[in-house]
Image (cartoon, grey):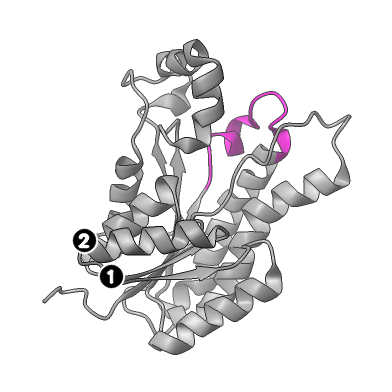
Amino acid sequence: MSKLEGKVAVITGATGGIGFEVAKRLGKDGYTVILNGIDDEAGAKRIDELTAEGITAEYYGFDVTNEEAVTSNITKIGEKFGKIDVLVNNAGGLGGRSRFEEMTTEFYRFVMALNLDSVFFASRAAIPFLKKGDNATIINYTSNAAWNAGGPGAGIYGTSKAGVHAITRALAKDLAEYGIRVNAVSPGTIDTPFHAQIKSTKPEVFASWKNNILLGRLGQPEEVASVISFLASKDAAFITAETIQIGGGQALGI
């Protein structure tokens, strides 16, 4: 019997990439894992994969930028289990590239909604249930772009991730009195489908990225999942308002 039996972890954007590895890792840690996504077919497939490994998992399909959908689904989850122990705000993305002069308001709002509104919506909805959790915690994702403002055309992505960095600390202040911890991870270049297009069209560029990483290689999704596993655990019970870089030294910009 797992020592974490009965604990519930909600992971947004968990049907692929880092999110799925996080769900798998937390499932192996003993959590009941609740996966969110917008591809219901992929969600069903992922649940089958997790179940085959003895992990208790469920899928809820909703768009994290839709306030009503986030609130109603997180509430359903919390009411079903009576609590939420871990919320991993994994959903997010670049959304495309646009220089500011040509940037449409629609694109601006989409990227901000995907990366920042989603964290606010999910966290707000989960707080009443996190208050009933054990060693309850929220884990967000920021990025090197939050500090360096992103590459060409990724300025609004960097802006949104800077917001995630700030809201992580703000939530930590707001929720400390309830014993709810809030931290963030900042993955560097991780070898996931997120980079599939450039990997297939410009393999030499993709291969060169490791030259900017002190450890000389790209990260693996499992290496992000292991840090999130730690932050969710009681081993991290005295850690809050922190951001952990998972980039092999990439943030130093060699």
Magenta-drawn stretch, dominant element (helix, strand or loop)? loop
- Please name the residue shown 75% across and 50% down the image: 110
Give the percent coordinates (x, y) of residue 204. Answer: 48, 10
| Nearer-the-camera pick, 195 or 226 | 195
Is residue 239 at least partly visible in the picture? no
- Which residues make up the magenta segment? 142-156
Is residue 81 at least partly visible in the picture? yes
| Nearer-the-camera pick, 112 or 49 | 49
Relative to 49, is 75 above or below?
A: below
Where disc 1 sits, the SS reads loop
The residue that disc 2 covers is: 53
Q: Is residue 190 magenta?
A: no
- Which quadrant is the N terminus positioned in? bottom left
Give the percent coordinates (x, y) of residue 32. Answer: 31, 73
The mark found on residue 130 in the picture is: none
- Please name the residue shown 55% across and 69% down the image: 123
